[in-house]
Image (tube, rainbow, N blue to C red):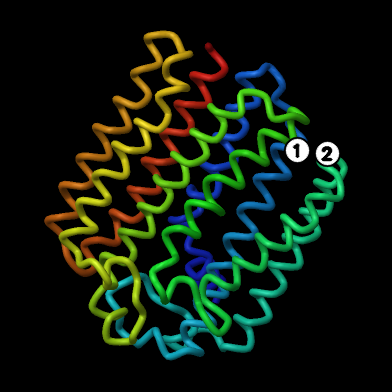
Amino acid sequence: MIRKWIEAMRLRTLPVSIAGVLAGCGCAAWQGRFSFLPAILCLLFAMVAQIASNFGNEYYDFKNGVDRKGREGFRRGVTEGDISPDAMKRATFTMLGLAAIIGCSLLCFGGLWLIPVGLAILLFALAYSAGPYPLSHHGLGDVTVIVFFGIIPVTLTCYLQTGDWKNLTELICTSVAIGILAANVLVVNNYRDMDDDKSAGKRTTVVIFGRRAMGYVYLFSGVLAMGIMLPLWAQMPPWAAVVPTIYLLLHIATWRKLTRSMGTALNPLLGKTAMNLLLFTMLLFAAFIIA
């Protein structure tokens, strides 16, 4: 049973949460103001909130009849009968509560204005799959990922360590770029599930625009993200160009496999896309420290 719950956490996608926080830490380190305690609290909050969203996605997609048994994606515990719907619902709100507790600890570093921000994060963790207008069912999942896995975690993680908004242009460029790269993980997920989603009435961007178009979006997104960060690269030493170069080489290789794969063969590429993002942010963090 423990294995079923671990699978429901979708650990393959957690590098997306880690990447946003790590990029924010890098921005703070670049200013010489990295602080371990708020950094680790931001990381815990991001990971727990994503797990809550993953649990909620399983529960509400089952409740809304979106998932079916024998789907090509990773096994869904509730749909396959491994985990009861009530247990998954309780787990979802338990994780949301834990995220709220961790978030409250960050008030010491950022102030009371973080409360509405934290509430919005937790609300959208549910709104992705729940409510009268689930965002992931109406082509808005990609935008949601850009905002809540890129812009918000990168900027807030940096702010909670530095206490100000210095280097705002570079910070925003980095956060948008990370969000775009994170959205590519969702593209792979929806690329694989297009047929299942279409039959269930779930209108993801891949259902709306088709696999061919979104395959090119996947490729272009990686290039665009590196381009958006040009204001940052311009301030880095020449050797820092190795960071986007390594990422783009890995990104293009993964894209080539994406366009040649179908069904369950796409499952490893979801994790590969997430790991490409994590490796990029690790290299970026190292470059920030060295520079």
Residue 283, position as x, y percentages in the image: 45, 26
Alpha carbon separation for disc pair 1 and 2: 7 Å
The reply, left or right, for residue 195 in relation to residue 163 is left
**For the image shown, how many numbered marks are present on the structure?**
2
Residue position for label 1: 38
User: Which residue is at 57% across, 73% downward?
Assistant: 127
Residue 153, position as x, y percentages in the image: 61, 45
Q: Earlier in the sequence, mark 1 or mark 2?
A: 1
Relative height, residue 32 to residue 126 (above, below): above
User: Which residue is at 58% across, 63% downward?
Assistant: 51
Amino acid type at mark 1? Pro
Front-most of 252 and 120? 120
Relative height, residue 68 to residue 190 (above, below): below
Q: Where, by quadrant of the figure, is residue 221 drawn? A: top left
Front-most of 87 and 282? 282
User: Which residue is at 40% across, 85% downward?
Assistant: 66
Amino acid type at mark 2? Phe
User: Which residue is at 53% across, 12% downward?
Assistant: 290
Q: Secondary structure at mark 1?
A: helix
Characterize the local packing of mark 2: few (<14), some (14-19) or many (20 or more) Cα atoms within 10 angstroms: some
Q: Secondary structure at mark 2?
A: helix
Contact between labelled residues 2 and 1, with CB atoms less than 8 Å apart: yes
Q: Which mark is residue 109?
A: 2
Residue 13, position as x, y percentages in the image: 45, 56
Characterize the local packing of mark 1: few (<14), some (14-19) or many (20 or more) Cα atoms within 10 angstroms: many
Of tags 1 and 2, the one toward the viewer is 2
Which quadrant of the rendered structure holds the N terminus? bottom right
Residue 31, position as x, y percentages in the image: 65, 18
Front-most of 48 and 134? 134
Relative height, residue 60 to residue 135 (above, below): below
